[in-house]
Image (spheres, grey):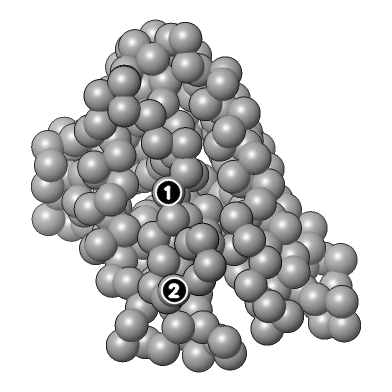
């Protein structure tokens, strides 16, 4: 069974749909439970738990993990997908934006990893996929958000640390680093890959499913999924 954060829309929705289609039982953590239930009204409670999760609220992370264990008894995979973009540069954005980026994009995945790691270790083939970004492994140019880039580099660092923490017990962790994906997050942002060449969320979801299904001796520490040619990406 797999937990997916931020599966109300965008990439998270595509990941949850892909995993359900692949036969996983899925627990999604979302801010608005009632409206998200409607999005998944075709899926039975036996296969899907829609739980409250706000990345800015530590208590909701613990409650989501607890309700997932109550419903499904064990946890095989965690996909840290929930994330935000804010423009924070040297002459734009403010400390509140930077704090929110850190809270949602870095601290919440850390918190969930801490909570879930014992259960992933217990199953012997646990998996974590962190939805980072190409902005997590390089700084492209000053049209990018410095704050977002910092938070995604932190998520990649968390991925490497988590990989070490769980490795001996069969836990495999990947920082998946897509370029622009066609969701609300990047719609109309300057400097972003034009819409026609952006990745469909379903493509990212297929890659997540592939990463979760790999055997323990095929460990992918990080994986770029670029929409454009860059020197080593
Ligand atoms: N789109 C891209 O080009 C791109 C590229 C690389 C990586 N990524 C990463 O992929 C992930 C998903 O992005 P997306 O493109 O699907 O963005 P999106 O369409 O804006 O969706 C963001 C998701 O995160 C959730 N979320 C935001 N703040 C939250 C909070 N405080 N607590 C819980 N959930 C929260 C949203 O929930 P609500 O519905 O409640 O707002 C929504 O489900 C993010 O981590 C993003 O950084 C995106």
Of residues 105 and 225, the one nearer the viewer is: 225
**Is 215 positioned to the left or the right of 97 in the image?**
left
View extreme (front): residue? 231
- Give the vertical position of 44 relative to 140 (above or below): above
Q: In the image, residue 233 lies at what x, y percent?
A: 48, 62
First reached walking from the N terminus: tag 2 or tag 1: 1
Task: Give the CA distance from mark 2 to mark 1.
Answer: 15 Å
Splitting the image into 4 quarters, where does residue 46 fall? top left
**Is 100 positioned to the left or the right of 114 in the image?**
right
Q: Which residue is mark 1?
A: 223
**x 36%, y 78%: residue:** 198
Give the label, 2 or 1, closer to the camera.
2
Residue 199 visible from this viewpoint: yes
**Label 2: few (<14), some or many (≥20) within 10 Å?**
few
Position of the N terminus by quadrant: top left
| Label 2: which secondary element | loop
Q: Mark 1 CB in 8 Å range of ligand 1?
A: no
Q: In the image, residue 181 lies at what x, y percent?
A: 39, 71
Q: In the image, residue 139 lies at what x, y percent?
A: 67, 66
The answer to whether the residue labelled 2 contacts the one labelled 1, judged by CB atoms less than 8 Å apart, is: no
**x 12%, y 47%: residue:** 21
| Label 1: which secondary element | strand
Residue 52 — which label? none
- Give the vertical position of 15 relative to 201 (above or below): above
Q: Which residue is mark 2?
A: 229
**x 68%, y 47%: residue:** 154
């Amino acid at each position: 069974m797999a937990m997916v954060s931020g599966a109300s829309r965008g990439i998270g929705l595509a990941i949850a749909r892909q995993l359900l289609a692949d036969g996983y039982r899925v627990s999604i953590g979302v801010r608005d439970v009632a409206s998200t239930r409607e999005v998944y009204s075709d899926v039975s409670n036996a296969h899907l738990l829609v739980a409250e999760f706000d990345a800015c609220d530590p208590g909701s992370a613990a409650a989501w993990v607890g309700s997932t264990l109550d419903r499904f008894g064990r946890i095989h995979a965690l996909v840290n997908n929930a994330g935000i973009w804010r423009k924070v540069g040297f002459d734009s954005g403010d400390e509140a934006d930077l704090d929110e980026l850190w809270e949602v994009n870095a601290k919440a995945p850390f918190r969930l990893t801490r909570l879930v790691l014992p259960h992933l270790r217990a199953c012997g083939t646990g998996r974590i996929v962190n939805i980072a970004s190409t902005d997590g492994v390089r700084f492209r140019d000053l049209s990018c958000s410095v704050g977002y880039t910092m938070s995604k580099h932190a998520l990649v660092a968390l991925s490497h640390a988590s990989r070490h923490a769980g490795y001996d017990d069969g836990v495999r962790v990947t920082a998946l680093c897509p370029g622009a994906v066609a969701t609300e997050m990047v719609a109309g942002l300057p400097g972003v890959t034009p819409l026609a060449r952006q990745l469909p969320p379903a493509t990212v979801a297929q890659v997540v499913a592939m990463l979760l299904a790999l055997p323990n001796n095929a460990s992918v520490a990080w994986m770029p999924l670029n929409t454009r040619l860059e020197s080593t990406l």
